[in-house]
Amino acid sequence: MAVVDSFDFLLKELERTCTNTRDILAVIGVLYACKRTLQCLTGLIKATNDHLLSKLSYISNYKKRFGPWAVVTGSSEGIGLAYAKELANRGLNIVMISRGENKLYRAAKDIEEQYKVETCTIAVDFAHGKEIYEKIWSLIKDKEIGILVNNVGVMYEFPQLFLDVPVERLWSLVNVNVAAATMMTHLIMPQMVQRGKGAVVMLASGSSSQITPQMTVYAATKYFLDYFARGLQYEYRDSGVIVQSLMPFYVATRMTRYSQTLSKPGLFIPSADTYAKSAIATLGYSSRTSGYWPHTIQAWISDSIPEWLWMWGATRLNNALRRQGQEKLHHKKTLRKRGSELSIESDS
Ligand SMILES: NC(=O)c1ccc[n+]([C@@H]2O[C@H](COP(=O)([O-])OP(=O)(O)OC[C@H]3O[C@@H](n4cnc5c(N)ncnc54)[C@H](OP(=O)(O)O)[C@@H]3O)[C@@H](O)[C@H]2O)c1
């Protein structure tokens, strides 16, 4: 009898505890649901601000708001050139910096003729490090620079494991992606702070939103830029200067040309012009954005999936992209070899 009583007591106790546990779990569930709803709502509000309200920026006068000149690094093609054109379209004079002198000169002439603004071209190689900044400074120091777009950047030839990336490329990744943005900002930002207006845009990347294998050093340099932009924005929040971190996912440019898939512009892989038009409107509206609404959807997905799943997916994608890059490289080498064989035959 005593055993039956104890068992009955035990069951009742268990039921009471379970009800309590169920209540606690229910409260945790409700709190979690509230948190996720709040995250979704803030995400939606931010996306509306970044991609709809920002369209109002077309009525704001960038030249008056920030200053008459813009400096765009890496502006002879790709996103940099598209940015230079968009800024010229808004009436700003442009300082364009890249390596290839002729290509840069031609791009600048087109901009002058099309938008009736002044341009200044500076042909330097950011991979050379410290010595180039004196030359840049001597050519821009008399200009009132309102906007600096730290766009220049290099990637691997195609996605690769760290030890397969040539040493020269690793130095370029550091000197071009990290040092150039740091030193250009250090050169130009003081006059902005002094005037109490200006904007610095940092071209980071969606690849650093989670750990992306086979793009490790590239994504790490982009993480640096995102961190740098966010830190600066806070340090100088009362100075009148705004600092923006732009985190695009794939844009069809020379950088993605190693892959056939990434070279075809579409909704999720825009052309540089489409991307720049959208991203430039967010200046002054958002201090950290993908700059383009389909990329914001990609950023949401990246934020909401666990790291292991992202890394697993990125590895599969980058394996496929690496194969495309290797095939393209092989094809290029074969063509070059055939070309030199033909020229030897015609010489003899
Ligand atoms: N395309 C994408 O999918 C993507 C995605 C996320 C972020 N981004 C970032 O967006 C930025 C622009 O990318 P993009 O795709 O437009 O690149 P891109 O098409 O390869 O153009 C790069 C530009 O930088 C110049 N440049 C390259 N190396 C240089 C060096 N050592 N010194 C001086 N100039 C140099 C190039 O001109 P020269 O060769 O004549 O020097 C060119 O004007 C980069 O920071 C990139 O990381 C791109």
Image: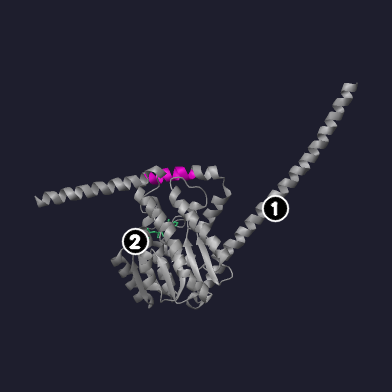
Res 125 → quadrant: bottom left
Q: Say whether residue 321 is magenta.
A: yes
Amino acid under disc 2: Asp
* Number of dots carrying numbers: 2
Give, as a single range, the part of the protein colored magenta: 313-322
* Image vertical order of residue 3 relative to residue 335, above or below: above
**The N terminus - image quarter:** top right
Q: Which residue is mark 2?
A: 125
Name which residue lies at 69% across and 49% down: 32
- Residue behind mark 1: 34
- Disc 2 residue: CB within 8 Å of ligand 1: yes
Q: Is residue 221 above or below residue 121?
A: above
- Residue 47 at what x, y percent from top left? 57, 61
Residue 117: x, y in percent? 38, 77
- Residue 112 found in image quarter: bottom left
* Most common secondary structure along the magenta stretch: helix
Q: Is residue 232 left or right of residue 341?
A: right
Specify few, some or many for label 1: CA neighbours under 10 Å numbering under 14, 14-19, or 20 or more: few
Query: Which residue type does callout 1 highlight?
Result: Cys
